Image (cartoon, helix red, strand yellow):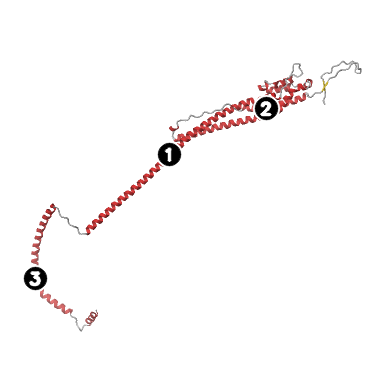
């Protein structure tokens, strides 16, 4: 065991070798030495420096409230289809931008939470060292704790001077106690582990919690924009679908109309063809009837009274002409007969001579071979 004596030995010594008076010595065992305290303070300084460095990183992150304005939706019924499509694209882009902002905010939130976790990893050792520094004066002789801590304490206090969670806490008093240790007015209140933890948790999370709250509000607002824009997109999409259905309906109606017209035209054409065929058949029938009538003796219809009178006059005229012609014919015939008789009388002798000659020529000669041959052929026949 390391044994430490008081800082000053006090006694009345008259002779080194006399035993008349004896000095009284007070011997105490020191549990803690200044070197131990210095090591712990250095550990505390490193932990606080690490935490403050992480806090600076968080402070650099922009966490102002981000909000997006929801676009005002015009009257959809008054827009044309192209305008509706353009509006839908605009709203979709607006929603995409809002979602991108939300992703950015979520990333910031995640990094802040990760940084807080890194800071909290320093808290167990920091809590242990501060708790021990707080309880040393109660467990050890003050003379054992005395040391040169001023420079180290000042460097620690300068780290937390801008952080009110540490400046206004009992933890700061711990460092002040060791800075002024040995003075008569120095005293230190013992802190519990719970008190130290609460102070440190406040130190590492107060500002960060505010930033997280700001980010959460921004995310909430952007989600409202996303939800509102999504509803608007749905309305525009519904209107577009309605227009599309109307177009399909009109298209179908037109197709049905064309189909009906085509069927009607086909029917009309068939009707026209049928009528033409009937007309052609009727014409053929009439032609056949005409031909049939031409081939059959026609039955004369009794003439009308006017036709009878006209016919009678024509007949009388014709009869007169016929009578004249007959008289002329008779005269001509009489004259012709006279001439014929003269000619016949003159040619009668000649005719008789010719007839006799022909009979002689037609009589076969029995001595002629050709006559015999012809006679035989005749006999065969």
Q: Is residue 332 left or right of residue 196?
A: left
| Coordinates of residue 214 in the picture (x, y in percent) | 59, 26
> Which of the labelled discs sits on residue 295, or is there none?
none
| Res. 40 visible in picture | yes
Tell me how far mark 1 sits from mark 2, CA to CA: 67 Å
N-terminal-most mark, 3 or 1: 1
Q: In this view, does 130 lie to the left or right of 346?
A: right
N-terminal-most mark, 3 or 2: 2
Tell me how far mark 3 sits from mark 1, CA to CA: 114 Å
Residue where numbered disc 1 is placed: 247
Q: What element carries label 2?
A: helix
Q: Nearer the viewer, mark 3 or mark 2?
A: 2
> Which of the labelled discs sits on residue 341, or is there none?
3
- The image shows residue 25, relative to residue 90, as above or below, that is above
Tell me how far mark 3 sits from mark 2, CA to CA: 177 Å
Q: In this view, does 88 lie to the left or right of 320?
A: right
Q: In which quarter of the image is the N terminus?
A: top right
Label 3–label 2 contact, CB within 8 A? no
Q: Is residue 337 left or right of residue 221?
A: left
> Which of the labelled discs sits on residue 51, or is there none?
2
- The image shows residue 218, relative to residue 25, as above or below, that is below
| Coordinates of residue 359 in the picture (x, y in percent) | 16, 78
Q: Nearer the viewer, mark 1 or mark 2?
A: 1
How crowded pointer 1 is (Cα within 10 Å; few <14, some 14-19, many 20+) is rated as few
Name the residue rendered at 66%, 22% in the picture.
165
**Residue positioned most to the bottom:** 367
Q: Which of marks 3 and 1 is in front?
A: 1
């Amino acid at each position: 065991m390391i044994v430490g004596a008081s800082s000053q030995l006090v006694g009345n010594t008259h002779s080194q070798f006399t035993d008349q008076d004896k000095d009284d010595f007070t011997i105490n065992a020191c549990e803690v030495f200044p070197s131990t305290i210095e090591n712990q303070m250095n550990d505390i300084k490193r932990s606080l420096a690490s935490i403050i460095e992480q806090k600076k990183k968080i402070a650099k992150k922009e966490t102002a409230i981000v909000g997006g304005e929801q676009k005002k939706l015009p009257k959809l019924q008054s827009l044309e289809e192209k305008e509706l499509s353009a509006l839908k694209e605009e709203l979709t882009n607006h929603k995409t931008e809002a979602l991108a902002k939300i992703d950015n905010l979520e990333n910031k939130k995640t990094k802040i939470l990760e940084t807080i976790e890194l800071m909290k990893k320093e808290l167990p050792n920091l809590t242990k060292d501060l708790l021990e520094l707080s309880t040393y004066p109660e467990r050890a002789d003050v003379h054992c704790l005395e040391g040169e801590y001023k420079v180290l304490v000042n460097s620690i206090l300068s780290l937390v001077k801008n952080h009110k969670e540490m400046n206004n806490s009992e933890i700061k008093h711990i460092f002040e106690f060791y800075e002024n240790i040995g003075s008569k007015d120095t005293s230190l209140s013992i802190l519990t582990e719970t008190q130290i933890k609460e102070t440190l948790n406040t130190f590492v999370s107060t500002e960060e919690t505010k930033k997280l709250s700001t980010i959460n509000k921004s995310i909430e607002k952007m989600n409202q924009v996303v939800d509102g824009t999504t509803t608007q997109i749905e309305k525009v999409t519904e209107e577009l679908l309605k227009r599309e259905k109307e177009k399909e309906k009109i298209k179908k109606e037109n197709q049905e109309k064309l189909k009906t017209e085509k069927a009607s035209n086909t029917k009309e054409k068939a009707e026209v063809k049928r009528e033409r065929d009937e007309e052609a058949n009727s014409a053929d029938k009439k032609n056949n009837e005409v031909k049939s009538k031409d081939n059959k003796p026609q039955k004369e219809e009794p003439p009308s009274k006017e036709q009878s009178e006209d016919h009678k006059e024509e007949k009388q005229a014709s009869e007169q002409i016929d009578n004249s012609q007959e008289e002329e014919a008779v005269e001509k015939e009489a004259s012709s007969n006279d001439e014929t008789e003269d000619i016949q009388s003159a040619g009668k002798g000649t005719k008789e001579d010719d007839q006799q000659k022909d009979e002689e020529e037609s009589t076969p000669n029995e001595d002629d071979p050709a006559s015999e041959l012809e006679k035989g052929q005749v006999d065969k026949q």
